[in-house]
Amino acid sequence: MTRKIGETLHDISENPSIEADVIVVGAGFAGITAARELKRAGKSVAMLEARSRLGGRSLSRPIGDGKVVELGCEFHGQSDSVSARTARSVGIGSHKVYDDGYKLIDDGGRIARWKGAIPKVSPAALVDFGQAALRIERMRREVPQEAPWQAPHAVQWDSETMWSWTQRNIRTKAGRSLMRLLIESGMAASPAEVSVLHVLNYSNGTGGFRAMTTVTGGTLENRFVGGSHGLALRLAQSVTAETYVGAAVRRINHFSDHVRVSGSGFEAVGRRVVVAVPVPLSGRIEYDPVLPAYRDQLTQRLTFGSAIKYLALYDEPFWRAAGLTGMAISHTSPVRAVLDGSPPDGSPGVLTAFVTGPAAHAVGRLSEGKRRELLLREFVRYFGPRAGKPYDIIEQNWMAEPYTRGCYHAYAPPGLYTEYGPALKEPIGRIHWAGAESVPVEFGSMSGAIYSGQRVATEIIACDADDGPGHLTAGPGKPATSRSVL
Amino acid sequence: MTRKIGETLHDISENPSIEADVIVVGAGFAGITAARELKRAGKSVAMLEARSRLGGRSLSRPIGDGKVVELGCEFHGQSDSVSARTARSVGIGSHKVYDDGYKLIDDGGRIARWKGAIPKVSPAALVDFGQAALRIERMRREVPQEAPWQAPHAVQWDSETMWSWTQRNIRTKAGRSLMRLLIESGMAASPAEVSVLHVLNYSNGTGGFRAMTTVTGGTLENRFVGGSHGLALRLAQSVTAETYVGAAVRRINHFSDHVRVSGSGFEAVGRRVVVAVPVPLSGRIEYDPVLPAYRDQLTQRLTFGSAIKYLALYDEPFWRAAGLTGMAISHTSPVRAVLDGSPPDGSPGVLTAFVTGPAAHAVGRLSEGKRRELLLREFVRYFGPRAGKPYDIIEQNWMAEPYTRGCYHAYAPPGLYTEYGPALKEPIGRIHWAGAESVPVEFGSMSGAIYSGQRVATEIIACDADDGPGHLTAGPGKPATSRSVL
């Protein structure tokens, strides 16, 4: 059930001049959590959200009977994850994703059923891939989540792509293809794009490399009752009075003792600002003084993955009767992964599909008709003719959303962690950073975002106790001109 | 000699409302060339420049007697390069960089003299590195400059970093170190950051892999008489009347038949717009409708290299009497490369130094005093005690410049060319792209920028002849909401 709280949100156009101790930019999980925690600690806060709604990358759509489908972040794994614990603290429970029966794997037209942890591949490929997966599990245990760049082999692992690592560590064609499939469906980026160190860090956040794409025992095991967007709105209830929508922040002026945060027709003045928008978008705000090179170049490098999410609605989850879980993965199709996204009572039946990595752009450039045709053709291949006749299809392209511009999350290309990692969360004077990718604990997830909100609140409370600016290792933006230094 | 044309430039604040056939954003080599060519073809143009000066990444500083030192782009190679031909067409010649004598190579304190094409290393390392360099030369010949992503092995070469390629293709420690040194000094990025395909494409632009860091016979061979900034200003003379400074563009509204380009307190309306700012900064402009995902995600990925440039001025180029060219390169020092940057008559003596790659950020975070101390200590190590006593040192940190934010140029991380390459120059409706990195012929250079200005002018003239928008493969920005597609 989505909670209607839109009525009580303030529109920034009616409140063009705001003052608070802390200005929070962005009302996703990170911003909402930061605002909650700061308010709880006695600070006055003002949260500015560009959209007309809260929740960032979480978004529900009602489908009748008080039920929703989820267009954004949806799944969580371990019951002790930050997001699950936070949900329980506000009375929101979880339910299991349907996982009873066979899963499907498509190898260019040949569709096989499989069960268990590793998709059906030849025995040789299984051994080949299995040893690589084990190696990744060993490697990731050396990577500290708070500072992946401090892993003993950080520089080496951050110097190559997952593609070249795979070429060296997996010999069979089928094993390599499986690695590509898991990275592209699990991280929405191709193995060519991501640093090995990033894969290890991201795996730590999901509870393991294989858990990244696993339902039972993995990070796809649970969903929040009422949807993750409902959780965001529930968390936001305590700061509704401090929330302003329609407030796209374009400029942050920062001084030794205050900040001025502004956009078209509004201005908010505070002692500090929390920038809780995705890192790539944080670089698009104009800062005065300009950000230090170190932070600016981080925002040039951290980049969003590529995915389009589809939800197909049927009268019932007909695949269950055929002994299928609803999960399908494909080595060759742009429709890389499908899951059963039905509500707990199984009505309606929902197939949730992801078009990810390079395929997301190829599909995104097709006409709407061609996209629908492609999706239904692949659904029919996986689940038979009934899959071709949903009563509705919903498409959500976060890459096209002006206040997100990618999904599932941002990723680190080679060299980023070891050269720029600390800048992910290091404050610049009175500018503090939060967001799912700023932590980097449980990188890119709801948990990561919530954790970052808690972290930044603690950081601000500590700074305020000192009454000083943030830890200023990078120095403020220097006058950007050449000059004699002798 | 820098040309003083500042007096004749318009300030945007005195001209807050402009109309022209084509609005050009950014007055570097690309924008200036586009404006020149468009005007020559009979279009009315208005060129908007955020700074109070023209020339983008080219910048001179007068040092008396009508001489200048160059703080930005400085060198060019082959006499048939686009920049050299363009300079000759406006009566500007070139002069040679001093290259008579021994060069120095520093291996962690041991400084050796060398001559010829490859720095002094052990015979084993020489053979090892030499075969790798030959392999790169063979590979780059397969890469078409207009479309590197169409090389026969493009996907493979774009899937790994130069670091992992080096690990596999160079066996000796000294050989690998030399590769790192050449990439970091030549491209201002670490081998861990750049795609192999990008190194090949960039090498094609410099006339060969080894030419990238070579004076005689290489891309460092020549400088423009009066400096590259002087060339930019000479080229801009024919469009001075159409140039507006102090015009930082923040927003581009684009429609089926016109564009509206605006910033704080000004607005320019035209039939088309040329965005001629660096690709990473082009993503920071607000577009309405928003750019297609494909172009936006390109701007998230293409990123600037990291470098700080130093110029040390002495009464005379004293190193020449010691038989030295003034070139020094180092395997271990943050001061990766030094060149003789003296005016043609050798007065004053100028040492030009580059701190590049990861070292640029480490050095950038030091205090001004520590930076000076580091630079002079390294100069003394390379060239003896006199090098420690320049009469002036000039520091130019393009990474800190708000309207550049990096140097020497942007680079492509793995996956970019093959997934996003065509978006570098593909117009979006009435928005056209230019810039040193948009070509990608002679990627990242003055030549590349000038070429792109010519290319975009031709493109616009052709589009106008059709009276249609640009080639719209990506489609306009879609309404950024979820929706049913059935």
Image: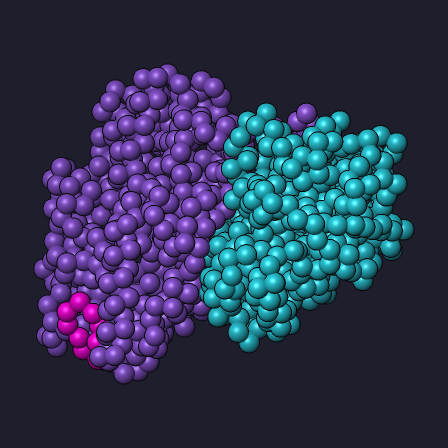
Chain colours: A purple, B cyan
Question: Mainly helix, strand or loop, the magenta region?
Answer: loop
Instruction: Determine the residue positioned at 30% across, 37% down.
Output: A452
Residue A289 in the image: above or below residue A176: above
Given residues B168 and A113, the one toward you in this image is B168
| Depth check, front residue: A78 or A262 | A78
Q: State left or right for residue B297 relative to residue B453.
A: left
Quarter placement of the C terminus of chain A? top right
Question: In the image shown, does B120 or A153 lie closer to the viewer?
Answer: B120
Q: What is the number of callouts on the image?
A: 0
Left or right: B303 with respect to B216?
A: left
Which residue is located at x 63 percent, y 60 percent? B202
Q: Which residues are magenta?
A: A111-120
Residue furthest to the bottom in view is A110
* Rendering coords of residue B106 (x, y %): 62, 46
Write down the quadrant of residue A213 in the picture. Answer: bottom left
The stretch drawn in magenta includes residue A117: yes
A62 vs A425, left or right, is: left
* Up/down of B454 relative to B9, above or below: below
Residue drawn where x is 35% and y is 64% of the image: A184
Q: Residue B29: within the magenta?
A: no
| Percent of width and height locating residue B108 | 56, 44
Q: Is residue A367 above or below residue B180?
A: below
Q: Position of residue A28 (x, y in %)?
A: 31, 41
- Residue in view at x 25 percent, y 51 percent: A141
Residue B283 higher or lower than B13, as above or below = below
Q: Answer whether residue A213 is visible to the viewer in this image.
A: no
- On the question of residue A374 being in view, the answer is yes
Left or right for B35, reference A343: right
Tell me residue A391's x, y (percent).
Answer: 24, 68
